[in-house]
Image (cartoon, rainbow, N blue to C red):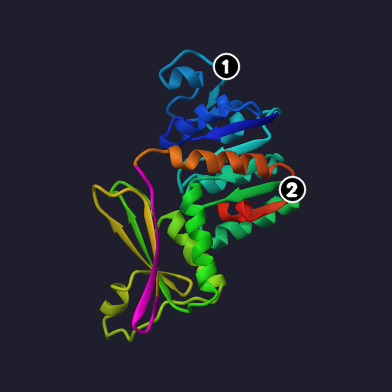
Amino acid sequence: MIGVCIAGATGWAGRALATAVLAAEDLRLVSAVSRSAAGTDLGVALGGPAIGVPVAATVAGALGADVDVLVDYTSHRAVEANARAAIERGVAVVVGASGLTAADFAEIDALARRHGVGVIGAGNFSLTAAMAQAAASLVARHLPNAEVIDYADASKPDAPSGTSREVAERLAEAGVASIEVPGDADGTVLAARGTAVGPIRIHSLRLPGYSVSTEVVFGLPDERLTIRHDAGMSAEPYVAGTLLAIRHVVGRVGLTRGLDSLLVE
């Protein structure tokens, strides 16, 4: 049985994941991390009866001998330090929080290899999002130019989203690039072209009424192809993919990037 610690267990995604881990026959929820609920039982923190899962204020305080995998659904401000704390204790990590760059993941990969543990990181653990990313990677072999449009509610703290950033990095690895246009003297044109993640331009839209969506637009003369993933308002789409990652990360060494990487194994 795999012992699991969830960082961000009282948050939007963490709550749904905690329920799923508790229901899984091959997983055991050992501990949780939540600053707001530290010192309590997770069941009580979630509004129910005690379930015997202690809540700590930090990852370091939650990683006992029975924890095999840390799942991090905190924030882009905390996730890198949390991952490092787990790796240095020999605990495998599933990174569900967004905001890490390719350079951040490269450092995590090197640390994980030094300690002989596995890390699985994905900008989005939805199975359908993984399929969309796999489709974009396939198209990237044949179409050289693309841009990404990143949609989310105004409350989302990071831009671009982890999903959009990961897609852009994958496209860049395949040799895809956005077409650059000449900028004027004060840089207005370039500023309006969105942020650059490598050679790919990402345009982040943040407005009320949107959930997380990622749209990849490939263009050729007189035609275009759009691949789009739309998430709903609940955290349920991310649960199945996260459970898949928990079951696959034990025994690995180094970083595996993207849920789609697991689906093709």
Q: Which residue matches tag 2?
A: 115
Quadrant in the picture for the N terminus = top right
Horizontal arrangement in the rendering, residue 265 relative to residue 135 (left or right) = right
Q: Which residue matches tag 1?
A: 52
Within-10-Å neighbours for mark 2: few <14, some 14–19, many 20+ = some
What residue type is disc 1 on? Gly
Q: In this view of the protein, which residue sits in the foreground, 262 or 31? A: 262
Tell which circle, 1 or 2, labels the residue nearer the N-terminal end: 1
Tell us which disc is closer to us: 1 or 2.
1
Q: In this view of the protein, which residue sits in the foreground, 198 or 250? A: 250
Horizontal and vertical percent position of residue 165 = 46, 61
Horizontal arrangement in the rendering, residue 223 relative to residue 200 (left or right) = left
The residues tagged by marks 1 and 2 sit, at their Cα atoms, a distance apart of: 30 Å
Span highlighted in magenta in the image:
219-232
Identity of the residue furthest to the top in this view: 49
Where is 207 relative to 181, above or below? Answer: above
**Callout 1–callout 2 Cβ contact below 8 Å:** no
Q: In this view of the protein, which residue sits in the foreground, 182 or 63? A: 182
